[in-house]
Amino acid sequence: MSGTALLRGVKQHQGPLTAELVREPGAFGLGQVPMRLKPDAVTTSVCGFCSTGCSLKIHLRNGEAVNLSANSDYSVNQGMACPKGWEALTPLAAPDRGTVPMLDGKPTDWNTAANTFARRMKRIIDQHGPESVAVLSTGQIVTEEMAFLGAFAKFGMDVRHIDSNTRQCMATAATAYKQSFGFDAPPYTYADFEESDVLIFFGSNPCIAHPIMWQRVLMNRRNPKIVVVDPRRTETAMAATHHYAIQPKSDLMLLYGLAHLLVKRGAVDRAFIEASTTGYEAFARFVEAFDPLRVSRRTGLSVEQLHEFADLICGDQRVSFWWTMGVNQGHESTRTAQGLINLALMTGNIGKPGTGANSITGQCNAMGSRLFGNATSLLGGHDANNNEHRAKVAGVLGIDEARISRQPSLAYDQIIEGVAEGRIKGLWVLATNTSHSWIDSDACNRALEKLDFLVVQDMYPTTDTARRAHLYLPAAGWGEKDGTFVNSERRIGLVRKVRRAPGQALSDFNILRLLASAWGVGDMFKAWTSPAAVFQMLKQLSKDQPFDISGIEGYEDLHRCGGIQWPLRSGEEPQEKSECRLFADGKFFHANGRAKFLFDEPRPMPEPPDKAFPFILLTGRGTSAQWHTNTRTGKSEVLRKLYPQQCYVELNPEDAKVMGIGNQDRVSVSSRRARVEATVVINACVQRGQLFMPMHYEEVNRLTFAAFDPHSRQPSYKACAVRIAR
Ligand code: SF4
C-alpha cells in the first residue's frame, strides 16, 4: 500500500487505529506539511536544541536530509549556527536509536505496546484513582504534540497530574511574568540585543548557553556597556565591560540594593510608574532598608561597585535586563526575576527599543509548552476554574466540558514526591531524562524504582530514565516530524520532517493517536489528524488571549515570513521578517492594564556551607557543544571533541594550593546526599570557597540539594554545600 493510501486509510478508518494505519511515511511523503517539496531540494527548519530558534537550511537528496547549513535569510540567526545546530542531523543516525517498542526489556510490536499501555495504566487508575498516574513531559517536542499530549492525558485518560521539564528551566520566568504583567509574556525581540545601550545579564552566560544571541549582542553598534552579574567569571563575564562577582544567591539582595539607590537618587520614571504600574510606593518604602552597607556585606561587592552599577542604570540610555538559569534556578527565584522586572518598570525601560525585563528561555519549545502543555494552566493559557474558558476550550476541541478537571496539577517535585510515597504508581515520561536531570537524583531514582509501571517515550532506549522503563516507546526526533516551536522572543517557527524515523519509531503525534485509540477515546481525537490540523485548533484557542495568533493562516505563512512573533490577530497581515515588542503602549495584561511591583524579604540559602561541607557547589552549562543530559549531543563525534569526556570540577588556584590538589587530579566531591568522582580543573574563574561542575554529567545532580522556589516550584540547582578531597 502506498503512503498516500495509508493516510487515506487513517482518515476513512472508523474502528480503533492500529500501528499499520499510522505507519510513518518517508520525508514529505504524506503531505502533513502542505508545502510540497522536490526530492532534491533545500528546505528550512528551526533547530531543535535551544530556545534561540535558529533556522537551518536542510539539504535533501531523494527526499531525505543529507546535510545542513545555517540560514542567512532568517532574522534570528542571520546565517549563523552554534556547534549543536551544525550537528543537528547526527543524533538521528545514532546506532542506539530505538527502533521497536520494548516491553520489560524485550522487543514487542506497536499494537501490543499500545494495548499494554492502556491496560496497565487503566488498571492502576481503577485500583487507586486518577491521581495515581502522572505524566512528565518536555519542552523538546513540537507544540502540536504538546497540545495533543495534554489533551489526551487530561481529557482522554482523566489523569490529573501532568508537568514537564520546563519546570526545571522556565517555571520561574512564567510565574514572575504572570504575577507582574498579568500573563506569561516575555516582552522583547532579538533586535533589542542590538538596540540597547546597557545590557545587564543576570545569572546568564549567553556566550556558551545562547551563542547566537551573544552574536546579536556583538552586532550592537551603539558601543554598549555589557554588565554580567555572576559568582563565576564566565565566558560572558570575560567579554563584558563590567563583571560583578556576587556571592552565590545574593542576587535578590543586590537587586533591592540597586532599587534603593535609584529611589534615593530620584532616578525613576515617574510618568511611567504613575500611568502603567501599581505598588511602587510600597516597593520604594520596602527598599529603604537595603542600604549599600547591608547589601555590600551580603553580596561581597564594595559600596563603590554598588554605586557604579546604579550609575549604569541611571540616565537616558536604553537599558535591558536579561536573565537565565542563574536566576530561574534559585530558592527565591520568582522574587529575583521580579527584582529585575521592578528595575525595568521603575526606570521605564520596557516597551521601547533596547529595553525590557527579558527572560531567555532554555529549550527549543519551552515557550510552546508554557502556552499549550495543558499542565499548570488549561490549554492555551486558560483557567480551568473560569467557566467561560472551560466552555471555549471544550467547544474548540469538541469535548464534553465535564472532562475538564478543575483540580490543579501537582508540580514536578510533587509528582516525584508522590512516586516516592507510593501515591503515584504509574508514570509516563516523554522526551526528558528525569533520572539524570532531576535535583538530588539518587533520591529521585530510588522513587522511580517503586513505580508499578514506568513508560518512557524517547528517541533512545539508552537514556538513564529509559533504561528503567517497563515499557519503552520509540519516538521520532527533531527532523523526523512536522510542527512548530516558539522561541524566546515569542517567534513561532516551522519544524519540518526531513528524515524518516528509523525502524518502527513513530512521531510522538502518531504514538498519541495510537494510544488514544487503544484507550478507547480515538473518537474524541478524530479531528487531530495531523500537526497542521492541530495548528488550526491552537489558533482558535489563542483567540482573544494575549498570544492571539488567529491572524496566521497556516504553516505557509510561517515559512514565508521567516517565523511570526505572537501576537498576530485576525485581520492583521503577517509581515516578512517582522519584529514585535510588547507593551509599547504601556498597557499590561492585568485587568487594570497595569504591571505590579512585587517583592519579599530575601531568605537565606537553603543549604549554606559549614565545617563539614565548606564549599558552595555551583552548577551550569559546560560548553556550547553540550545539551542538557547529553543524550543527543553525546552522539556526535564532532561535538564530543569539544568538551571533556569525564566529569570535572573547577577549583580556585588558592584553594587548590592550600589543599595540595593539582590540575587534572582525580578527587571526590561529596554532599550530604552522595559522593562522586571528578577531574580537577584549576581555574581562577571560580571564587575561593566555591566549586563549579557542569550539569551535563550524570554525577552532578547526585550532589544537588532539593530546595524549591515557593511560587514557581522550580528547583534550586545552583548552590549547595559540598566538600572536596583527593
Ligand atoms: Fe540551535 Fe540554539 Fe545553536 Fe541556534 S544557538 S543553532 S537554536 S542550539
Image: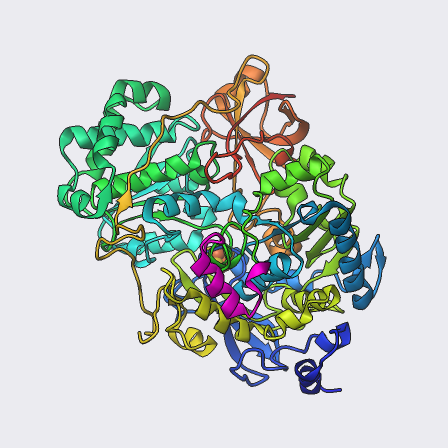
Screen quadrant of the C terminus: top right
Location of residue 176 by image quarter? top left
- In the picture, measured across the screen, residue 35 lies left or right of residue 162, that is left
- What predominant SS class does the magenta segment belong to? helix
Q: Does 534 sit above or below residue 661?
A: below
Q: Position of residue 385 (x, y in %)?
A: 48, 52
Q: Give 256 or 326, whichever is nearer the viewer.
A: 256
Q: Position of residue 361 (x, y in %)?
A: 45, 50
- In the picture, measured across the screen, residue 363 lies left or right of residue 417, that is left
State yes or no: residue 397 in magenta: yes
Report the label total: 0
Query: Does any portion of residue 372 appear in the rendered image?
Result: yes
Query: Does any portion of residue 381 appear in the rendered image?
Result: no
Q: Give 86 or 393, whichever is nearer the viewer.
A: 393
Location of residue 560 by image quarter? bottom left
Residue drawn at 50 percent across, 69 percent down: 396
Q: Give 685 or 402, whichever is nearer the viewer.
A: 402
Residue drawn at 73 percent across, 37 percent down: 422
Residue drawn at 26 percent across, 52 percent down: 593
Extreme residue toward the right, this view: 106
Q: How is the image coloured?
A: rainbow
State yes or no: residue 548 in magenta: no
Q: Position of residue 362 (x, y in %)?
A: 48, 50
Residue drawn at 32 percent across, 48 percent down: 181
Screen quadrant of the N terminus: bottom right
- In the picture, measured across the screen, residue 304 lies left or right of residue 138, that is left
What are the residue bounds of the magenta stretch?
Answer: 381-403
- In the picture, measured across the screen, residue 56 lies left or right of residue 491, that is right
Q: Does 123 sit above or below residue 325?
A: below
Q: Position of residue 606 (x, y in %)?
A: 51, 24
